[in-house]
Image (spheres, helix red, strand yellow):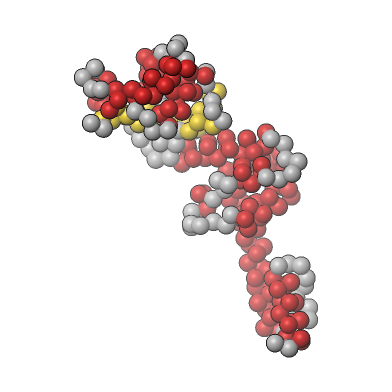
Amino acid sequence: MSSAELERQQALLAALLGSSSPDGLTAGQAGVARGLKAYRLNAQATAERALAAVYQPLKDELGDEQFAAMAWALWRRHPPVQGDLARWGAELAAFMAEQAGMPERLPEQARLLWAFHEAERAADAELDLASLQRLDGGHDPAELMLKLMPGLSLLGGDVLVWRSGWRAVHEVLAADQAEFFRQLLSGRALGPALEATLAQHPVFDFAAWLQRALREPWLQAIESHK
């Protein structure tokens, strides 16, 4: 490649990356550069809109310019891997935590907002009342699995997020409640989950937990893995 051709290629690359104007490029190169610049600007706007749909409170706090820059940076670091842009943005909290000088509360807020988003998008599910009969004493608790509602999650060890009606809600749980949820969300059966929770929190009241789990609702079904 001649030095002149190398210079033209470098100029094209600079134009594509937005670090220069397309002046001095050949007509074909300039056309490609302008087209890709338009594509890049559209992608930037798309990134901001998609992220704001989930993280509007962060946008309100950071301001439009800083939020747009963050959205574009996240798009380049973690580009969408599927057509549904509502599924993009899960990495924002970790991305923000990597940034020097970022207040710790902002990544935490991002985690909570994403958990809200996941809860509200979760599949609809109804309580399987018939399955509660498995708690009548005729089944070994070590073989019973408590299936929780779709979208329910535990953040930071004690913040429970779930969907109530159509809206996501959250609550900071007492230590014994949080421990029981950790056991269930780790995949443990009812018996082992109760034993592990009671070993650390002898005051845990499963009957009271169950009543609230049915009311909120947190519990979808009791499944037997016999």
Q: Quadrant of residue 29?
A: bottom right
Q: Position of residue 214 (x, y in %)?
A: 37, 22
**Image: 125 above or below 76:** above
Q: Is residue 90 visible?
A: yes
Residue ID at (39%, 24%): 193
Q: Position of residue 68 (x, y in %)?
A: 69, 51
Q: Quadrant of the C terminus?
A: top left
Is 168 on the left or on the right of 1, as rendered? left
**Image: 17 above or below 32:** above
Direction left: furthest residue? 138
Direction top: furthest residue? 203
Question: How many numbered marks are there?
Answer: 0
Is 165 on the left or on the right of 135, as rendered? right
Residue ID at (37%, 27%): 219
Is 61 on the left or on the right of 225, as rendered? right
**Image: 6 above or below 169:** below
Q: Position of residue 48 (x, y in %)?
A: 64, 52
Direction bottom: furthest residue? 2
Residue ID at (28%, 30%): 223
Q: Position of residue 46 (x, y in %)?
A: 60, 56
- Front residue of this view, candidates 27 and 4: 4
Residue ID at (76%, 41%): 101
Q: Is residue 129 visible?
A: no
